[in-house]
Amino acid sequence: MISALLCKGNDFFMQSKSIIGKIGVPDHPVPIFVDHHIYLSIYKERWSVCSGADWSKCPACPHMVDRIILWTNYISNDFGLNWFFALAWLIGLTLIWYTSIKLCLGYTCFDYKLIADEVGRFLLFINPIHQFDKLFEIGKMNTYLGGALFFDGISRITGAYLLYQFVSAFRKYSKK
């Protein structure tokens, strides 16, 4: 199957559609997403086989940007089929960014009495449009934040991307 798709220069989706038509994929309740998943799986397999090829001589092989997008889509929600991957990545990375910001701001002590407050702040932090100064109680006199704004910016970008992946994985349940 891969040899038919490998470095031909033709439109990839038309090739994969004809190959899948020859295989005879059975009907599925959500054929759009299954077909899309199969196309992207073949595409991923194709560029992993093509990785040793000379990219300049192979116009059908994906460029580096396409490979990055394909790779992140695969690990974040398995091409839109697994919402749990996106949720696990979202909570895990948000926890890392939240902890990094707290350490940059100098919060190193842990008090078990503040667990409910910290969980509440963490849940607010998941929202990419949170207000940094209100969430972490930054006063106007404190101008040095020790890199906390950098981690906040990175967390907003990754959080928004992973929320998008989470919602796109749930779209398969709402399509008719």
Image (tube, rainbow, N blue to C red):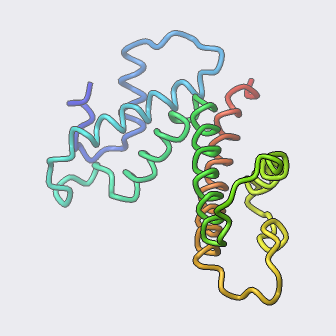
In front: 140, or 78? 140
Q: Left or right: 61 with respect to 132? A: left
Quadrant of res 144: bottom right
Compared with 51, 15 (above or below) is above
**Percent from the top left, x then y, of residue 141?**
79, 90
**Percent from the top left, x then y, of residue 5?**
27, 35
Q: Left or right: 174 with respect to 40? A: right
Quadrant of the snapshot with the C terminus? top right
In front: 113, or 168? 113
Quadrant of the snapshot with the N terminus? top left
In front: 132, or 146? 146
Compared with 49, 99 (above or below) is below
Residue occupying the point 63% across, 50% down: 95
Quadrant of res 106: bottom right
Q: Left or right: 129 with respect to 7? A: right
Residue occupying the point 33% across, 51% down: 62
Compared with 93, 37 (above or below) is above
Residue occupying the point 80% across, 55% down: 121
**Percent from the top left, x then y, of residue 84?**
62, 31
Q: What is the tally of numbered marks visible in this picture?
A: 0
**Percent from the top left, x then y, of residue 162?**
62, 48
In front: 137, or 85? 137
